[in-house]
Image: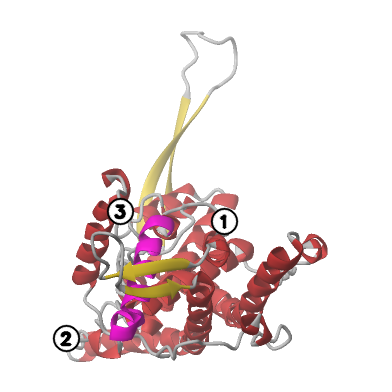
């Protein structure tokens, strides 16, 4: 019960059993991928599932020094900026679908190979960094596509004397205008997410309140009459509820990866590191695919409900002797919740830069146009 006493439901979650670094630690993605694959084989995870182990294509442990500033990959800020760009693109495709603008949808899905992105409920679907995607789209020249439409003249079906009329028309595609629309949608979503990420503290507190009710009373009657923490409104972007679900899922995934990495750096936490790493391999598959809603929330609920584990190391053949340690899953969940609060705070700051990013991109494009007209060559690309 001491754990629950440390949680103030009015102020949110405020417990970190082991200090977790606010920044993202360095860690080799290749090393982590091999390690998880080996652990999956040892734990008996089928090979068909090992290809989808919980691993972010972009490293969640890269720091600012390891960013590719040209293409906007890696780094804590760019993780969320890539994701907000992806969701802005998906929102634009949704809006274009409602207005039946098929040629523009086809262009955007084919642009830099993003076929099928419209209906994907997940993160990591943007194939390039946000800077590279937006700047390339913004600089692409307008063009026209030709479409044909067939219309019957009337009369009896199959009448050989009546020929169908074939009309040909052209549709203008302006990638720069689409990029400008993406800027607007991206800014709107970023503003919503700055508010939504501040609910992570309340979500953490609600998880532990629910867990306490289930442990003490075997049921949670309050949850039946509770409203969701995120309340939608008339001015919301098109997919705000889905965005909030993915935001919570992504934040939980990144925080779990960071806690596992942080535990690996401590010799005294070796058993906790091994247990949480194995648990993530087995139960974290839903993070890296479209696995429906509430993936992050259900992962933490399952972790909170897991029983304590006793680990014995160095015992003899008869099971005597050795070092005994107990792994508390509630403690692991507390660390993840504390860390995802840190992740959320850092992402709020990064999302506050979105408008400035757009202005900088437009300014650089204008400078390139000026240099091309006056000097005959654009500025050198960012390194």
Label 1 Cα crowd, 10 Å radius (few <14 / some 14-19 / many 20+): some
180 and 62: which one is in front? 62
Q: Pointers 3 and 2 in contact (CB under 8 A)?
A: no
Examine the rendered structure and indicate whether residue 285 appears above or below residue 190.
Answer: above
Q: Earlier in the sequence, mark 2 or mark 1?
A: 1
Instruction: Identify residue for label 3.
Output: 43
Of the two numbered discs 2 and 1 in the rendering, the one whose residue sits closer to the viewer:
1
Q: Position of residue 306 (x, y in %)?
A: 53, 62
Of the two numbered discs 3 and 2 in the rendering, the one whose residue sits closer to the viewer:
3
Instruction: Identify residue for label 2.
Output: 376
Q: Is residue 345 left or right of residue 113?
A: right
Quadrant in which residue 155 is drawn: top right
Q: Position of residue 263 (x, y in %)?
A: 35, 80
Label 2 Cα crowd, 10 Å radius (few <14 / some 14-19 / many 20+): few
Of the two numbered discs 3 and 1 in the rendering, the one whose residue sits closer to the viewer:
3
Q: Is residue 7 left or right of residue 123?
A: right
Q: Earlier in the sequence, mark 3 or mark 1?
A: 3
Q: Residue at x 55, y 21 (%)?
A: 153
- Secondary element at tag 1: loop
Q: Residue at x 71, y 72 (%)?
A: 229
Q: Is residue 233 magenta?
A: no
176 and 193: which one is in front? 193
Instruction: Identify residue for label 1.
Output: 293
Q: Pointers 2 and 1 in contact (CB under 8 A)?
A: no
Q: Main secondary structure of the magenta part?
A: helix
Examine the rendered structure and indicate whether residue 345 appears above or below residue 130.
Answer: below
Q: Is residue 274 magenta?
A: yes
Quadrant in which residue 39 is drawn: bottom left
């Amino acid at each position: 019960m001491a754990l629950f006493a440390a949680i103030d439901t009015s102020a949110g979650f405020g417990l970190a059993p082991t200090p977790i670094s606010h920044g993202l630690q360095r860690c080799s993605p290749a090393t982590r991928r091999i390690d998880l694959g080996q652990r999956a084989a040892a734990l008996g995870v089928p090979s068909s599932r090992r290809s989808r182990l919980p691993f972010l294509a972009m490293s969640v442990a890269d720091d600012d020094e390891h960013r590719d500033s040209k293409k906007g990959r890696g780094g804590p800020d760019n993780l969320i900026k890539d994701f907000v760009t992806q969701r802005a693109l998906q929102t634009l495709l949704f809006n274009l679908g409602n207005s039946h603008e098929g040629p523009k949808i086809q262009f955007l899905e084919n642009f830099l190979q993003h076929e099928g992105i419209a209906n994907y409920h997940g993160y990591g679907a943007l194939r390039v960094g946000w800077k590279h995607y937006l700047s390339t789209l913004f600089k692409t020249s307008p063009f026209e596509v030709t479409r044909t439409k067939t219309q019957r003249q009337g009369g009896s079906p199959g009448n050989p004397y009546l020929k169908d009329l074939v009309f040909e028309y052209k549709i203008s595609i302006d990638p720069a205008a689409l990029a400008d629309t993406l800027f607007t949608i991206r800014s709107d979503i970023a503003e919503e997410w700055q508010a939504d990420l501040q609910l992570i503290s309340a979500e953490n507190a609600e998880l532990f309140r629910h867990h306490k009710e289930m442990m003490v009373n075997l049921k949670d009657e309050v949850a039946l009459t509770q409203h969701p923490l995120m309340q939608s409104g008339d001015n919301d972007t098109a997919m705000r509820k889905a965005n909030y679900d993915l935001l919570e899922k992504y934040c939980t995934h990144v925080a779990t990866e960071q806690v596992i990495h942080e535990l690996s750096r401590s010799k005294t936490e070796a058993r906790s590191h091994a247990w949480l790493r194995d648990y993530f391999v087995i139960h974290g598959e839903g993070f890296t695919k479209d696995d429906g809603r509430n993936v992050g929330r259900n992962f933490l609920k399952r972790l909170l409900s897991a029983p304590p584990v006793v680990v014995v190391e160095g015992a003899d053949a008869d099971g005597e002797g050795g070092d005994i340690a107990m792994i508390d899953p509630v403690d692991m969940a507390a660390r993840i919740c504390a860390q995802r609060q840190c992740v959320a705070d850092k992402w709020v700051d990064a999302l506050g830069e979105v408008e400035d990013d757009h202005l900088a991109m437009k300014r650089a494009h204008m400078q390139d146009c000026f240099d091309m007209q006056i000097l005959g060559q654009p500025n050198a690309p960012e390194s």
